[in-house]
Image (tube, rainbow, N blue to C red):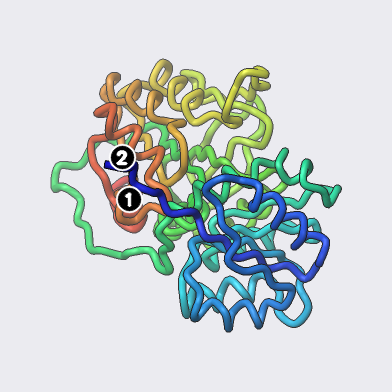
Amino acid sequence: MGESQVSPVRVMIVDDSPIVLSVLRKVFDSTDGIQVVGAFHDPKEALEKLRIMDVDVICCDYYMKGLNGLEFVRIVMQKSPKPILIMSAGIENSDQVVRLLDAGAIDVLQKPLLNDVQSYQQMKIVQKIRVLSGVKPITRRMRLEFRTSPERRAVPQIIAIGASTGGPQALGDVLIQLPPNYRVPILCIQHISVGFLDGLVHWLDQRSKVRVRIAKDNERLEKNTVYFVPEGFHGIVESNMILKLARPAESDIYCPSINTTFCSIAENIGASSIAILLTGMGDDGALGLRAIRDQQGSTITQSEESCIIYGMPKAAVDLSASEKSLNPSQIGQYLLQFA
């Protein structure tokens, strides 16, 4: 019997720059397992063709004549949801990035300064496309009813949340449910493209009742506030609830590292903690979640059906690190018992 053939990843490219279209086509055409099924400089034409083309992933520019990337994403996600990767050198501020993610784009990348094949290969765009080809687009988060157990846990000292791809949407669904006087400090570790964290934090702060901001070195974590570990640092929580920021080693794969923060919480806070691992590719956070569970802390993973990418939660479940799996709305309702 012959080997079964694996279908190639079918990619649609949308960019009003002929040079970028040509470069991206060369990158994808030279890669086994990826097939360019359409390359369009007119986003409206791409939308028309999308109705009759079999497409796995869309790679799209942000600034285009006639229809910008945000409008394009909204139309696609309404009419024919597909995993969408936005690439642009012209995104002026990180608020635009968050709006793209909220509209349904899976990821946003800054274009290289040089429009050549090597510069696009260096940003690992092929790996991004392959990962996104396995994503099932979710147009709206599920909001299922969830009642917490009558047995109320003691109020924890800290709640830590780790997230990667798809995390901004999931975090929004969790935090929007919390009141402004929430009694427990929340520390978030989000993998996001460099330069976009400020916009995410601003968007979540505007959307949520609880205060959201970026943490500082040697800062005591206080109630009523959601903190984010800043870009370029690992966050280490000490026993006195002081957050220390540490520069990563050259060998570190993730920065900020969810495992680093979770493991520090396991060591210094232990049972008086809740750790939550949301959607994302890879396995960051799984070992840290297991360490917290081993210290009798409470651990939660996002449910598979509500994840954009079930990589990190699955890795934690495979380690028996998760006590329960909930969708983001359920996680928010679970956390309300400490309000």
Residue at mark 2 to residue at mark 1: CA–CA distance: 8 Å
How many marks on residues?
2
Q: Is residue 266 visible?
A: yes
Viewer-nearest residue: 310 or 184: 310
User: Do the CB atoms of the residues marked 2 and 1 lie less than 8 Å apart?
Assistant: yes
Q: Secondary structure at mark 2?
A: strand
Circle on res. 300:
2
Q: Tell me if 226 is positioned left or right of 177 in this view.
A: right
Viewer-nearest residue: 253 or 15: 15
Residue 218 in percent (x, y) is at 64, 24
Circle on res. 331:
1
Q: Amino acid at mark 1?
A: Ile
Residue 220 in percent (x, y) is at 57, 29
Circle on res. 75:
none
User: Residue, x 67% and y 19% (percent of image)?
Assistant: 250
Viewer-nearest residue: 152 or 333: 333
Classify 149 as above or below 10. above
Quadrant of image for the N terminus: top left
Residue 162 in percent (x, y) is at 46, 38
User: Residue, x 69% and y 49% (percent of image)?
Assistant: 27
Q: Tell me if 147 is positioned left or right of 333 in this view.
A: left
